Image (cartoon, rainbow, N blue to C red):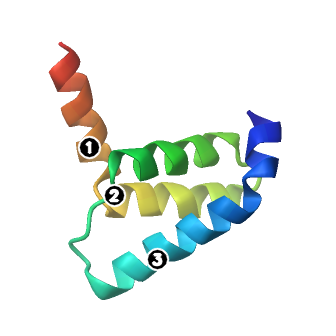
Amino acid sequence: MASELARNGGKRHALLSAIRQKMAEDRDAQLRPSEAVMVLEWAIECEDNFCKAELLNIFSAMGGLTLMKDVFADLH
């Protein structure tokens, strides 16, 4: 996973910039499922606590928790 994150560093930066832009333009914007998964994976893998907190705040603020709850509810 770490090597994949290193290879996708530019993609991560671009995605986070797009998510921040989305948040700035529309506070009610929601993450797409693929974005939510990527943000959560990056937060789990992140060794920097500030970065981890920022990613988890984005995940939470943009409905990532609700999205995951809905996915798990659909599985049960």
Specify the amino acid type for callout 2.
Leu
Q: How many marks?
A: 3
Q: Name the element at disc 2.
A: loop
The reply to whether the C-beta atoms of the residues labelled 2 and 1 are less than 8 Å apart is yes
Question: What distance separates the C-alpha of mark 2 from that of mark 1?
Answer: 8 Å
Q: Is residue 8 visible?
A: yes
Residue 54, image quadrant: bottom right
| Quadrant position of the N terminus in the picture | top right
Q: Residue furthest top?
A: 76
Q: Between disc 2 and disc 1, whose residue precedes?
A: 2
Q: Between disc 3 and disc 1, whose residue precedes?
A: 3
Whether residue 46 sits left or right of residue 44 in the image: it is: right
Mark 3 sits on what residue?
Answer: 20
Question: What distance separates the C-alpha of mark 3 from that of mark 2?
Answer: 11 Å
Whether residue 46 sits left or right of residue 16 in the image: it is: right
Q: Is residue 43 above or below residue 14?
A: above
**Where residue 76 sits in the image (x, y, percent)?**
17, 13
Find residue 31 and name its label.
2
Question: What distance separates the C-alpha of mark 3 from that of mark 1?
Answer: 18 Å
Q: Residues within 10 Å of mark 2 (few under 14, many from 20)?
A: many
**Where residue 44 sits in the image (x, y, percent)?**
62, 40
**Residue shown at 70% from the left, 56% from the top:** 49
Find residue 67 and name its label.
1
**Where residue 71 sits in the image (x, y, percent)?**
25, 30
Specify the amino acid type for callout 3.
Arg
**Residue shown at 45% from the left, 61% from the top:** 57
Residue 62, image quadrant: bottom left
Specify the amino acid type for callout 1.
Leu
Q: Residues within 10 Å of mark 1 (few under 14, many from 20)?
A: some
